[in-house]
Amino acid sequence: MIEPILASTGGEVPSMRPAAVLVVSLLAVALIIASHARPNVREAWSILAALVNFGIVASMAPGVLEGTVYVASFGEIVPGVELALRADALGMLFAVVASGLYVLTAVYSIGYMRGHDEPYQTRFFAMLCASVGAALGIAFAPNLLLFLVFYEVLTIATYPLVAHDESEEARVSGYKYLTYAFSGGLAVFGGMLAVFWLTGTVDFTRGGITELATADPWATGAAFVALVAGFSVKAAVMPLHSWLPSAMVAPTPVSGLLHAVAVVKAGAFGVARTVIDVFGPGVVGDLGLGVVLAAFAGATILISSLFALRQDNLKARLAYSTIAQLSYIVFGLALLESAALTGGLLHIPAHAFAKLTLFLCAGALYVQLHIKYISEMAGVGRRMPVTMGAFTVASLSMAGIPLLAGFVSKWHLIVGGAQAGQLLVPVVLVASGALNVGYFWPIIYTAFFERADDRERKPVLDGPLGGAPVEEVRSDGGSTDDSHDDHGHHDLPPSDGWDRPAGPLKETTLLMLVPLMSTTALVVLFGIVPDYMFFFDLVELIVEGATEGVNGQ
Amino acid sequence: MEWLIGAIILLPLITAVVPVVASLRWDNVGWHFATAVLLATFGLSVWVTRIIVSSGPITHVLGGVTQPWYGVELYADEFSMFVLLMTLIVCLGVLVYTRVGGPRGNAFYGGFLLLTGGMLGVTLTADLFNLYVFLEIMAISSYALVSAAKYRWSTYAAFKYLLVGTAGAGFYLFGVALVLAATGTLNMQDLSVRLAEVGYTDPTVVAAFALMAVGLAIKIALFPVHTWLADAHASAPDGISAVISALVPAVAVYAFARIIYTVYTVDFLTTNPDVGTMLLVAGLLSLFMGSTFAILQDHIKLVLAYSTVSQFGLVLIGLSIANETAIFGSVLHMFGHGIVKASLFLLAGMIALRFGGIRHIQEYGGLAKKAPVMAGSFGVLGIAMIGLPPTVGFVGKWYIALGAFEEGMWLVSALVLGSTLLSAAYILPFVNRIYFYPFRGTDADPASITRGMLASIVIGAALAIVLGFASAEIHTYLESAVRTLLEP
């Protein structure tokens, strides 16, 4: 009964390619572990796997744009639920972002892990590869059950990365992460059972599973709440967000690729699958739950930006920014208008490029100069001009400044909100943009326009809540409260200021510089010529399917 | 070919004396002999399973004595063969471990064959009294084997196990006597008809059910009659812990399923809805109390032992939901649990062998750095024990929770899923220690870990994942047997 709907989205073509990415990832994990004694060989596997996976994913892209769906089928996993992998438009969106950025992160990780002499590098590279494999599995999962399988595999694979440095803090964060993620997984499990019980299927169906439109609205509503609440844990929608700032204890490439791209977007992607492919925007609208979700997302956007204002730890500030930005995606999906859907989905790549750039910059600062706190960054733009330049571009994109990636998605969100008749939406988004400037500008300002011996006070950061001026100012311009002492960092920035780098592009290793420049280029390209980039057509295709399906509007 | 199922039981039972007799002349031939016998039995069982799959269930009367009162009738369908194959696979895995891990000595392997024979008998018998006999063969040999450990404490534990186990057997036997008094037969197939004639609300019939249920609950170690289990596990040899945790309860659950569905039939449950409810409550209590006790332990074998209480609570929940999906879930979960729990016990034994007898969580720190394969297997098996995808524990929960949903028992479904967090709470601390703490112990005896042991736990871990993907095939295989349980 579902077949005709599936067929209407374009031809299904049997192909082993969606499954091949998983095989490649598994093989790569095995090879990485096997060559633990030879780091260069090990990293070669890592990069090779990234390239091969990206190649396989990219090779399917043109076909998917024409409406083809690639399917690798292996029978059933439980009766009524297919064991298969399907590369459709929505899946491709996530797969291209995850596998493409993995290539850059794999290169960057080498520079980071070696530059920082991190322990347990084999485990790190193996688990990073496994996580990306799991993310690709999520992208290509054809039904909720397999989605959940890969979703939990992703949780398990990222746990060693969070607990990576084996300190007490890392272990506690790891536990916290697992508790949140497993609880979310269980909610998804429950919702999935309810859907299966209501309809006899959990297949992702463009525009929604037909039977859900006529099922008991209370049961359907409960299933929707369970699914979306479960996915919102990974998408860090408040109040389910608190694992994400803790998980920043992981090495920075992990924070970048997983906790800004793959893992958290898996949550947002889950919400997208739920709204578009399980229930259909029409049913969600009839249930009246879109508004509720939008309210949560909107609140998250504003509140977490306020949290971000008060973080001195650079990665923590980025984490709260991530929480806010992820909710843009959820927000767009919850508004159920085609322009808003477009905006929400476009925000997946747009945010990924920009946030990864920011994290890569943060990692470079940490490895090169041991900078962890914003209060240590005065004048660092002189020492690492390219890195901080990239940081600036990416943070402007975050704020939604035109000609950068963030603007493209935000514009569609605003239009969608206006179309939906929710005039609060543009207000929330514009306010959020202002807040973004509010917490990114001080970083840029201190890096480029301040020096170690000439710094201004940061009342929002240093003062009591609300930003009243502080009484005393230390000679280095930092705060008098000694809360930083337990961070164990020493006099940064150096009192005589930063030196200039030895030459152009010599501010840090090219292994880190090239990836972060590449992601910056993506941010700019996506901002200037979005319609030449693959994502625009892809998202159009998804939104078209979502709204023309049976449960569409 | 029907006589083959008789051979499956008799082969280990009769040959159990051989190692003992052989002690007169040779030392330490018991292991080789037991392995050879069980391999042969396994081969036979695979053959019989193939016959059953192609031509349906087999009934066989031992020795051709068809007198209903004295004859020993055997019955084998896909369900019994499934449990039987699990039993043999686990027993063979345990043998791989005990070759070096001990205990050695011919008498031990004589007992081991007896234990295996008893378990096989329980899975194949078609008669309530013979079920009692086989349960006791199984139980008595396991008392003996528990006391085979080198700890002094094990004698006490075995004695406690014996007292409690015998009380359980007494309950069961009393129930059988009542059934016989009420109906005049002990054959399971006959009983399903005669009990209906007597009437499912007849007090004797209900009382007999209650007595048998209590007796078997003791054998399964459900809460609150699980008390023998902690001592028995903690002091038994590791290989025997694997058997009494993974197999003895599973076989007892099999017997219980036969009594509920083949003897009393699903009509009994619909006539007496309270019985079903009580089973469900007992299952839920076991599930949550078992997990809670497990969380409170820091001794690996106790954690695993209480985890068994909790997992069999889950199995009982599936059985009490009484629809096809849930029962299949229970059977699958039981199978998966057997493989996973046995592997974990062997692993605990291997870790103790290699690292100087460590058993407590505090001593598990950093083992991954010394023993990556063992640590990796522990991780995978732990994940399977928790019931996370893509392992067999996950699909078992899927069927049980889905079955609950189909009956509209969404609260049960939610509790089943929620229990996953409790399971995570007792397994993850071990995984966390193994991987994310520094190594502070002594790598006392790396040579004691044989390739065979590693292979068996790796196979166990691999099965835990493969079975998760193969559940649709297993469903096809068991479909008719499960349907027969519900519609005899």
Image (cartoon, helix red, strand yellow):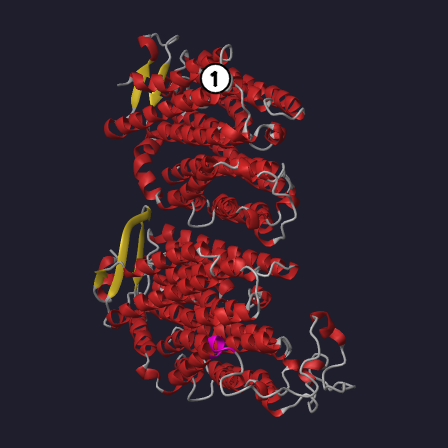
In x, y percent, where is residue B271? 43, 29
In x, y percent, where is residue A362? 55, 76
Q: Which residues are magenta?
A: A509-513
Q: Is residue B163 above or below residue A68?
A: above
Q: Is residue A510 magenta?
A: yes
In x, y percent, where is residue B391? 43, 46
Identify the residue shown where x is 26% and y is 64%: A69
- At label 1, the amino acid type is Tyr
| Residue B322 seen anywhere in this rendered image of the structure | no
Identify the residue shown where x is 38% and y is 84%: A525
Q: Is residue A281 magenta?
A: no
Give whichever of B401, B4 is nearer the camera. Answer: B4
Give whichever of A297, B81 is nearer the camera. Answer: B81
Where is residue A88, by image quadrant? Answer: bottom left
Task: Output the chain of dot 1.
Answer: B
| Residue A230 seen anywhere in this rendered image of the structure | yes
Farthest residue in the right direction?
Answer: A472
B126 left or right of B430 in image: left
Q: Where does label 1 land, which residue?
A: B132
